[in-house]
Image (spheres, helix red, strand yellow):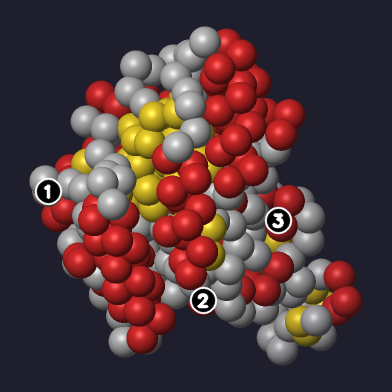
Amino acid sequence: MASKSSPEYSTSRVRLEVHLDAVRRNFAQIQKTVKPAQVMAVLKANAYGLGAVSLSDTLVAAGADRLGVAELKEASQLVRRHRVPVQIIGGLLETEIPECVRLGIICPAPDLATAKALSAEGLRRRKKVKIHIKVDTGMGRLGIPHMQALAEIRKIAALPGLILEGIYSHFPNANNPAHHKSKTQIELFQGLLAELSAEGIEFPLVHMANSDGINNFSSAYFNLVRTGINLYGVFDLGGLRTYKLTPSLALKTTLLAKRKLPAGFTIGYGCTHTLFKDTWVGTVPAGYADGVPLAASNSGQVLIRGKAAPIIGRISMDYLTVDLNQCPSAKVGDEVVLVGKSGNREITIEDWARVKQTHPYEIICSLGNRVERIYR
């Protein structure tokens, strides 16, 4: 039977609370920081798995100037829902081009071939196609290499049926403000813009700064920035923190079992933990299928009644086990906080990222499909 401190009923054992007021506050902080630049809310990968529909509704109402996604499937969902521009900010498959043009999605042009295909499709449909030309200043993934960009953009500018709405680049290392790479990229991009302007090729929108860029390189704001992870009150592990953000995510479940096990008992697959004394052991119905990092085995912790309960043994797909000796009042049915606050203690997404030796993006994107998203 659930205890008095039981959480509200949920259809899933594990629930992710997304606090929309915090998201709105974070957006306002970012908007204030980069003003007068516009703000693109990046909602790719279903808003990192948090739910693009609900987040887009919140962010458009908060004043997002446009929405950025990674692919046609994501864009088509949002362009039908909102009047603000929706654009794809990576690359395009050839098969995606007709539908992108039909729906009026703002398209990337990371190379001349894509620009030609967009031009041809626009002419076929008798529609003008808004594009943003992507320049590779050092990411090495997509875009026209900066040393070829002037010549290639001249050719793109001469194509019929296109509206050159924007030009952009991307940082691979903007979380490190001391590294020369990002400063060099900004200088290369600024130099290209000056060369294009001298030839009469201008772009209404210029963007380079992602969340890390916003925090570390104000010279990269131009007149549009792209932000994703900072919207949720999460920072990359390195770099500056230009503004104060409010954590908006909490991952919670319920204590399933509490048992007194004797010294010498082993815990979990692989018998990686042996009890050195009689111990109250709790079983928590959350595992790596829910996004709990396997690396937190024998090293992470959860919060119960405001106290830390160390994870013992190897985390499995559906369960993890904790030492409850520091939580003697814990009862079956108690709320277990995997990420978020309990009393005066807090576990953050960044904490999990450190345990896993990864970055916070992966942690958020790893939260499993069976985790119920609850918007507050």
Residue at image point 27% right, 32% down: 65
Q: CA distance from mark 2 to mark 1?
A: 32 Å
Q: Which mark is residue 320?
A: none
> Reading the chain from its start, which is encountered first: label 2 or label 3?
3
To which quarter of the image does residue 99 belong?
top right
Residue at image point 25% right, 70% down: 217
Q: CA distance from mark 3 to mark 1?
A: 42 Å
Residue at image point 35% right, 79% down: 184
Q: Position of residue 101 (x, y in %)?
A: 55, 21
Determine whether the residue tagged by mark 2 lies in a helix, strand or loop: helix
Q: Residues within 10 Å of mark 3 (few under 14, many from 20)?
A: many
Figure label count: 3
Is 258 above or below relative to 314? Answer: above
Residue at which label 2 appears = 354
Residue at which label 1 appears = 35
Q: Is residue 105 left or right of residue 345?
A: right
Q: Is residue 118 left or right of residue 175?
A: right
Q: Nearer the viewer, residue 51 or 299?
A: 51
Q: Nearer the viewer, residue 320 or 194?
A: 194
Q: Nearer the viewer, residue 366 or 376?
A: 366
Mark 2: amino acid: Arg
Q: Position of residue 255 (x, y in %)?
A: 60, 50
Residue at which label 3 appears = 287
Mark 1: amino acid: Lys
What residue occupies the far right of the structure in this picture?
Answer: 270
Q: Is residue 327 left or right of residue 320?
A: left
Determine whether the residue tagged by mark 1 lies in a helix, strand or loop: loop
Question: Foreground mark, 3 or 1?
Answer: 1
Q: Residues within 10 Å of mark 1 (few under 14, many from 20)?
A: few
Residue at image point 80% right, 81% down: 272
Q: Residues within 10 Å of mark 2 (few under 14, many from 20)?
A: some
Mark 3: amino acid: Gly
